[in-house]
Amino acid sequence: MQKRSNPRPAMDKFTTLSAVAAPLPLVNVDTDMIIPKQYLKTIQRSGLGKALFDEMRHNQDGSEIPDFVLNKPAYREAKILVTGANFGCGSSREHAPWALLDFGIKCILAPSFADIFYGNCFKNGILPIALPQSEIDKLMDDAERGSNAVISIDLEKQEIRGPDGGVITFDIDPFRKQILLNGWDDIALTLRDEPTITTFEAEKKLSRPWL
């Protein structure tokens, strides 16, 4: 077995983020809305950002719909999304977090998430934060300030700081927190056990050489 560094960061580490937050006050945003099915033929993670929210962002001729939030000048560089409950419901397509990340979205704030989508976010370096509706309402109000809607997130401290300096704390599974802080994907997590795997393979080669 070829030796590799153990573990190796495979995703960008998520430690802190200060960025414009875009408001998307919709509930039950499903994965087909995030990335329509016609874009699922590719297995490449790059290039999907242009199709993010395609049917809401673009007319049939490909032109932009000016009123959609991510087409507005103040939010074109948004890296945080503030949205409604049950975000990411529908099919389990991993293309949904791929498209969000390729567009530049690194953190999503919502009252709740679909379970599979929530897990896929961590696998791809996106931080999904579930907060009480009252806190989301405050952050949604902050996000509606346009280019002044800069929200800061500190994963280590588990804090969100709004434009006015108010602080909201959030909960996160400790293991998933470490995944983002260290930039570990599934392969990197497996390589953490490389010494054990190597020992196991060597022992099996001796005891069962016919395998």
Image (cartoon, rainbow, N blue to C red):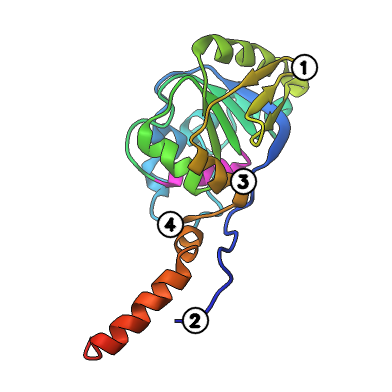
Write the start and end of the magenta stretch as one range. 94-105
Earlier residue among tags 1 and 2: 2
Mark 4 lies on a secondary structure that is loop
Eye-nearest disc, 3 or 4: 3
Which quarter of the picture shows residue 120?
top left
- Say whether residue 73 is left or right of residue 171: right
Q: Residues within 10 Å of mark 4 (few under 14, many from 20)?
A: few
What secondary structure characterizes most of the magenta part? helix
Circle 1 is placed at which residue position?
A: 165
Q: Residues within 10 Å of mark 2 (few under 14, many from 20)?
A: few
Which quadrant of the rendered structure holds the C terminus? bottom left
Circle 4 is placed at which residue position?
A: 42
- Report if residue 66 is visible in the image: no
Residue 112, above or below 194: above
Residue 167, above or below 189: above
> Which amino acid, mark 4?
Thr
Circle 3 is placed at which residue position?
A: 181
Mark 2 lies on a secondary structure that is loop
> Which amino acid, mark 2?
Gln
Q: Nearer the viewer, residue 154 or 79?
A: 154
Residue 35 spot, x, y in % from top left: 44, 40
Q: Residue at point 47% right, 62% down?
A: 187
The residues tagged by marks 1 and 2 sit, at their Cα atoms, a distance apart of 50 Å
The residues tagged by marks 1 and 4 sit, at their Cα atoms, a distance apart of 42 Å
